[in-house]
Amino acid sequence: MAAPNPHDTHATTEAEGHGSGGLPQFQTEHWAGQIGYLLVLFFVLYILIAKVFGPRLRRVMDERRDTISSAVATARQVQTEAAEQAAAAKAEVDKARADARATAAAAKARVTEEANARQAAEEAVVNARIAEAEASIGKTRDAAMANVSTIAADTTAAIVERLTGKTATAAELTAAKGAA
């Protein structure tokens, strides 16, 4: 007989393994070892999660919660400060507006007072000129009225002379003046 081929022996054991009935996970003779490994892996993973990963995750979540709550508190504090500053700024603006209105009213009153004083001074000057003009008119009128009788007598004499052709005497002119 010829020497056995090593490949043939491997092929034979492989064929025997395949012929025994399927996947080793479903063969009951392997279940005890699989359950043992499952329990060991479960406890190892449980201890890793409970003692290592869990506390780390808890610490990270606590830090995140603390960071978020401090950020929210800081934001609320900043918002409160901003509201207070806005109220202070609004009060300053309102005060500045009131001061500006008071300054404008005072300036308007001062300008009005100056205008009234200037108007009163100008009216006094105008009234003085009017009084001077009335006095001058009165003097001119009085002077004209003083000369009216002389002018009337001369005019009467000229009319009489023109109408009659004779010159009127002073006694006739005085009599005519008295009758008028």
Image: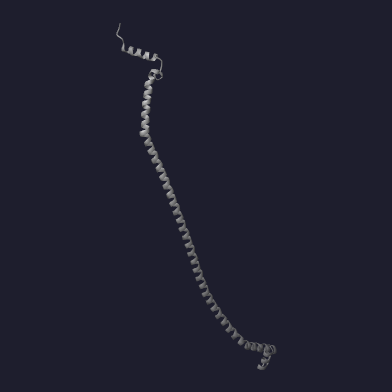
Give 15 or 116, whichever is nearer the viewer: 15
Give 174 or 131, whichever is nearer the viewer: 131
Q: Residue at x 57, y 81 (%)?
A: 134
Q: Percent position (x, y) of residue 38?
A: 38, 25
Q: Percent position (x, y) of residue 69?
A: 42, 44
Give 51 or 85, whichever is nearer the viewer: 51
Q: Quadrant of the C terminus?
A: bottom right
Image check: 20 left or right of 102? left
Task: Work out whether 61 lies above or below 119.
Answer: above
Q: Percent position (x, y) of residue 6?
A: 31, 12
Q: Quadrant of the N terminus?
A: top left
Image check: 115 left or right of 33? right
Give 124 or 156, whichever is nearer the viewer: 124
Q: Residue at x 37, y 13 (%)?
A: 16
Image check: 159 left or right of 42? right
Task: Work out whether 156 lies above or below 45.
Answer: below
For residue 167, what is the image quadrant? Answer: bottom right
Task: Work out whether 149 lies above or below 35.
Answer: below
Q: Residue at x 35, y 13 (%)?
A: 13
In the image as oriented, which residue stretches furthest toward the top?
Answer: 1
* Res. 98 in view: yes
